[in-house]
Amino acid sequence: MIRIFIVLLILSISKVGFGQNLVQNPSFEDTIKRTTAVFLSISWVAANKEGWNYFTPFNNNIDLRGGAPKNFVGFQNAKEGNSYIGIQIYFLGYNARSSVREYAQNTLSKALEKDSVYCLRLYMSMADSMIFASKNQLGVYLSANQVSANNRLPLPYTPQIIISPDSFNTDKENWTEYNFQYTATGGERYMTVGNFNDTNSLDTLFVGGGNQFWMESSYYYLDNFYLGNCDSLPLDTPIGLVENVLEKQISVYPNPFENRVIVKSGGNRSLDFILFNLLGKEIDINLTRISKNNYELDLGVLPKGIYYLTVYDGINRASRKIVKQ
């Protein structure tokens, strides 16, 4: 009886281990104790000399280029928590196809088991200021040994998973969910994410964005990775997180707008507002409180384009993308 109990216990522990998320720091909330100019994400490294970008509110008072939700490539709230990363898929500035690549690499908490089927899920959103959308470029490479290069060129490996192989991801407002299944060859312990293609196989779609040369690029935010047992794949709605009631309490209209925007709140708290342009620059607002729960923003002097309105009630924050036509 004792022997049977021990066998069942071992099998139970093994099943639990397989069921967990094997990606360490999957939503980038944990940071390394700061020894550089900005905070860095724990458990994630660069696989070559180019690096990638970590966006977190911890950087807001240090260097806004790496902040969140506002940063140097746009404005986006994290899919989960407050932080996320950004990867440049390719750069087309100067009318040239650059061979520079960025790769984010994670050491999994345990090696994958041979012939076991795993589910991979991640979320991606296009950065506001970038003008080229991507398809069939971003890949995920799983390997038993750590891969790296002492240069900035494409890594010479073939990813087992290609994200968005058939359609361009052009969504700059929402997070797009991607799901895949992977049968392990056994021993895979490292996950490397980036564009493994050479410069001759790039497929681009112009979508518009900023007007700086460095924005002639395809660049995406990534967040909330999961790799593990498909039966343990978490639901899209996180459990145990504090609900942001302000998101449901406010409405912003008309949108698109011509001169004025009305913000209506269903709560009892006074609201504060911050407006950003596409480049993340804060813009002065001519604000009038027309009733207890209604505010009018006079934005008639602004040029046509996309803006991001952040609303605070002293506890929660909500953001809205608004368009002047």
Image: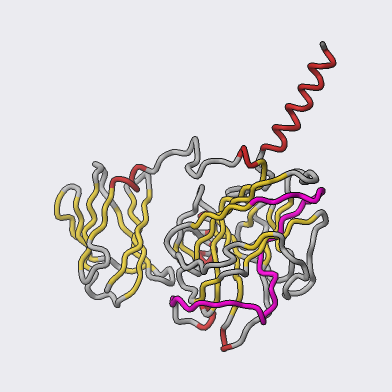
The residue located at (32%, 64%) in the rendering is 322
- Between residue 63 and residue 52, name the one nearer to us: 52
Q: Position of residue 86 (x, y in %)?
A: 57, 63
Q: From where the camera sits, is residue 61 visible? A: no
Q: Position of residue 93 (x, y in %)?
A: 56, 84
Say whether residue 105 is left or right of residue 273. Answer: right
Say whether residue 310 is left or right of residue 66. Answer: left
- Quarter of the image for the N terminus: give it: top right
Using the rendered view, name the quadrant where residue 174 is placed.
bottom left
- Between residue 53 and residue 63, name the one nearer to us: 53
Q: Where is residue 239 in the image (x, y as percent from the top left)?
A: 50, 37
**Furthest residue toward right:** 3
In the image, is residue 181 above or below residue 156?
A: above
State yes or no: residue 241 in magenta: no
* Range of magenta residues: 181-209
State yes or no: residue 185 in magenta: yes
In the image, is residue 285 above or below residue 185?
A: below
The residue located at (51%, 69%) in the rendering is 168
